[in-house]
Amino acid sequence: MKKQYKRILITAALPYANGKIHLGHLAGAYLPADIYARYQRAKKKEVVFICGSDEHGVPITITAENEKTTPQKIVDRYHELNKQTFEKFGMSFDNYSRTSIPLHHQTAQEFFLKMYNAGILIEKKEKQLYDEKVKMFLPDRYVEGTCPKCGAEDARGDQCEKCGTFLSPNEIINPRSKITGETPVLKETSHWYFPLGKYQKRLQDYIKEKNEEDGWRENVLKYCQTWFNEGLQDRAVTRDLQWGVPVPIAGYENKVLYVWFEAVLGYISSTKEWSYKQNHQKWREFWLSEDTKYVAFIGKDNVVFHCIVFPAMLMAWNDNSEDKYVLPTNVPANEFLNLEGQKFSKSRGWGLYVDEFLEKYPADSLRYALTINLPEMRDSDFYWSDFQARHNNELANTLGNFVNRTLTFVHKNYNGKVPAIGKISELDENFINEMRKAPEIIGNLIEKYRFRDATLEMMNLARLANKYFNDAEPWKTLKQAPDRCSTTIYLCLNAVKALSILFEPVLPFTSKKIRKMLNLKDNYYWDDASELSMKSGEQIGEIEILFNKIENEFISESSQLMSEGPVMTQEVMQKQTVTIEEFKKLDLRVAKVIECEKVQKSNKLLKLQVKIGNEIKQLVAGIAQHYQPEELVGKNIIVVKNLQKTSIMGIDSEGMMLAASDQNGKLVYITTSTDIEDGSIVK
């Protein structure tokens, strides 16, 4: 039987305070966490929702040096900017803290000392690169040089951008200091390490137990298993850096705690800060009680830290203290959201920042478009044309239309007052049953972290409400059967109320507007959506349009919000090595284009019908800016025939055509040099 918890602790990954929040961040951790938190509050659960800025680490010091300022000024700027952006987006954090505050330093140092005094940490002497000119050890990203794997000359000390290989500074060939450009020397230093490998068996048992209890995502389990298969290794807890949490022991005055160690403790310090602001000690109830369900929302790049490293740190603390911290019950990590087919990239200038987006469009429109396309199990893409279609066709034409037509009818024909309910027909009964089932159906999906499906069910209820309105024909029954008409409108008003409750986790601003139009207070809860609670004779409020249509010219202008970075070169695009067995899984075929047309409301997509031997397949390709449809008809192209079917802007795509970028950034489709028969296998 599933365990029942008294309270729910929800955390969202701490964003780095060295840049602005973009749409990929929202889709990765923050929007799913907010939907879950809002839902649980609506279910009358005791919830605390925690986040904050991650303000230490090398990327922040490098940003400060590039801008010729201090790390403190960098984090002050981005902490406030991102906090305001989250507020405009509707994030309902109970506390948004920062890791540079004294309370966090104290918490992190307390954890370090607990492990240090218990003899858990291991001191190691090692040689690291040292810049003699500025007399400092060089953290990984302060080292540049030649990649030992692929020979790229601009590899960083932690990773080569060309081949994707993770590196250590000592592996770099011909290393140079990013600060002075000088060649560093190897110099001995000492650091403390956490013996992560000693906790591997316990971590595997922990993940197995929690998966059986709460159903972890398959992608998260696979990431964890990959680390377990390789064997967990000792991880450095300290590093040679000036910016961060000082190491609280003698002889380490010029070192700080490694950011991987102290940043995750920001969840605890942020909860403490929330608790102290309220003059209570409830942080202890949330963190130190077995009655707490702890759900940590992250992106896939943080899986190892939240599923392996952080739980191991909490295990180490719990082994040596009367206070026992709860471990995450679930870690629903999302995959990546891409932008128009390309990964968000600060270095390439390819991104879409939330603060700029919200200057042009409502937060709820973005929340809906992202939720219905969340990368829950695989990467997904944000397309401007898809955003426009979701806003116009679903929010405006479906949800907004039903609310508007119902309230307009009430004002026009019932003096703005709720009509009485009369005799229930079979049509009414079916509609009532669907309304009553919706909260449980949607709620169960949210409980399982299936936010896309839950949102689809919300919109399906709005579609059903529109159908009911049409089928009941109140504009006819108003005179022909007044009792019939008043019953219809009474049920429609209750449906409007239900939609305001059920959509609230995804559309908080819109839900508030709807309740204002209904003249309702905000103290409605999730299960109230199934009740016919509107009171006959009560006055409703004034009507306002929920969603104005987004025209094509605005989308065209808005696409300029995307940074125009350099063309993605072959070097940047190079991916990790694959085995011959992995490559053999691809079924590459020659295909003949027999039909081709532009996708409406998209300036990048073409829809192709291709013949592959005896089969006809439909493809959607982002090459409309490079070819007119008629240029492709009759041409032979190379396609991936066995690619899993996907949907792009509501159009099925059953494969992928191969293309390459030339020096000017033009996409050139891959073809054959001879007139070979379609269906031929490409080897």
Image (spheres, rainbow, N blue to C red):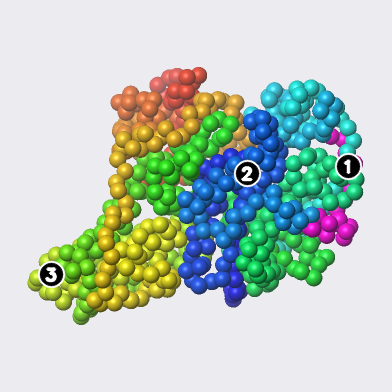
Q: Residues within 10 Å of mark 2 (few under 14, many from 20)?
A: some
Task: Please tell me how crowded label 3 is: few (under 14), some (14-19), or many (20+) other residues with Cα within 10 Å.
Answer: some
Q: Quadrant of the N terminus?
A: bottom right
Left or right: residue 97 versus residue 231 is left
Q: Position of residue 549 (x, y in %)?
A: 29, 46
Q: Is residue 342 left or right of residue 463?
A: right
Q: Position of residue 343 (x, y in %)?
A: 53, 37
Q: Is residue 60 magenta?
A: no
Quadrant of residue 476 within the rendered picture = bottom left
Q: Are marks 3 and 2 in contact (CB under 8 Å)?
A: no
Left or right of residue 564: residue 258: right
Disc 2 target residue: 76
Q: Secondary structure at mark 2?
A: helix
Residue 503 coordinates in the image, percent (x, y): 40, 61
Q: Earlier in the sequence, mark 1 or mark 3?
A: 1
Of residues 669 and 566, the one drawn nearer to the viewer in this rendering: 566
The quarter of the displayed image where residue 579 is located: top right
Which SS class for mark 1?
Answer: strand
Marks 3/2: CA distance?
Answer: 61 Å
* Secondary structure of the residue carrying numbered label 3: helix
**Nearer the N terminus, badge 3 or badge 2?**
2
**Front-lying residue, 398 or 376:** 398
Instruction: Spot the residue most to the left.
Output: 480
In this picture, is 542 found above or below 64? below
Q: Which residues are magenta?
A: 110-128
| Residue 125 belongs to magenta span | yes
Q: Is residue 90 visible?
A: yes
Q: Check disc 3 and give the amino acid type.
A: Leu
Instruction: Verify CB contact (< 8 Å) between mark 2 and mark 1.
Output: no
What residue does disc 3 label?
478
Q: Which mark is residue 190?
A: 1
